[in-house]
Amino acid sequence: MAKATNTEIINLLGEKFGEQLFDVTEPYGLLTFSTTKDKIVNVLSFLKENGKINFNFLTDLTAVHYPEKNQIAVVYHLHSMVNGIRVRLKVFLHENDATIPTASTLWNSANWMERETYDFFGVKFEGHPDLRRILNMDELNVHPMLKQYPLEDPNRVDKKDEYFGR
């Protein structure tokens, strides 16, 4: 079987989903595109179950916070081990309504990755079998990877310039 090209993948997806996929780019040869949270499970299912492309491995699932846009991007990296190709899929959510359907029904490995993404970014995965913190304390009432918190404690006296003759 010949390795599918990015153009062939785009054509397959275009036939099936049309305008539901957007922002199609190829940075460094990695096919990257976006969809909406309503269509994410359908797109992921198609990518996994289509015999020509067969994206059978969820490499990574994480998020990126864009505070200037009030958005959180949930990012999926998929790998077709049979064809040796990869794609990146993004879904942009408003940071005040960061909910998206779970991918753990398609890949068991999504379970841990979604828990980690919830723990650090606050993204809620609807239908997840056990969505709770995985690395941080249960009592922590913030999501530390959101870029809304200062990097350092502004009250630290050991960082004040007057102590260093400045």
Image: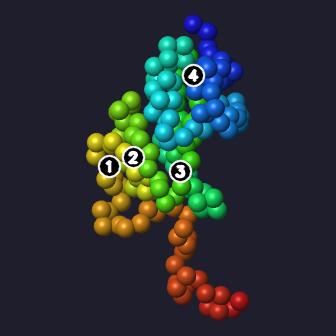
Q: Which of marks 4 and 3 is in front?
A: 4
Q: Which residue lies furthest to the top in this view?
A: 1
Residue 152 visible to an observer of this rendering: yes
Query: In whole angstroms, how far apart are the C-alphas of marks 4 and 2?
Result: 25 Å
Q: What residue type is labelled 1?
A: Leu
Q: Tell me if label 3 and label 2 are in contact, CB under 8 Å.
A: no
Q: Nearer the viewer, mark 4 or mark 2?
A: 4
SS assignment at label 4: helix
Q: Which amino acid does label 3 sit on?
A: Leu
Q: Tell me if label 4 and label 2 are in contact, CB under 8 Å.
A: no
Q: Nearer the viewer, mark 3 or mark 1?
A: 3
Within-10-Å neighbours for mark 3: few <14, some 14–19, many 20+: some
Q: Residue at x 47, y 29 (%)?
A: 42
Query: In whole angstroms, how far apart are the C-alphas of marks 1 and 2?
Result: 7 Å
Query: In whole angstroms, how far apart are the C-alphas of marks 1 and 4?
Result: 31 Å
In the picture of the structure, the residue carrying the numbered disc 3 is: 93
In the picture of the structure, the residue carrying the numbered disc 1 is: 131
Query: In whole angstroms, how far apart are the C-alphas of marks 3 and 1?
Result: 18 Å
Quadrant for residue 2, please give it. Answer: top right
Q: Which numbered disc covers residue 141?
A: none
SS assignment at label 3: strand
| 41 horizontally vs 135: left or right | right
In the picture of the structure, the residue carrying the numbered disc 2 is: 125
In the picture of the structure, the residue carrying the numbered disc 4 is: 16
Residue 5 percent across, percent down from the top left = 66, 19
Return the disc, 4 or 3, that comes first in the chain's sequence.
4
Q: Which amino acid does label 4 sit on?
A: Lys
| 114 horizontally vs 2: left or right | left
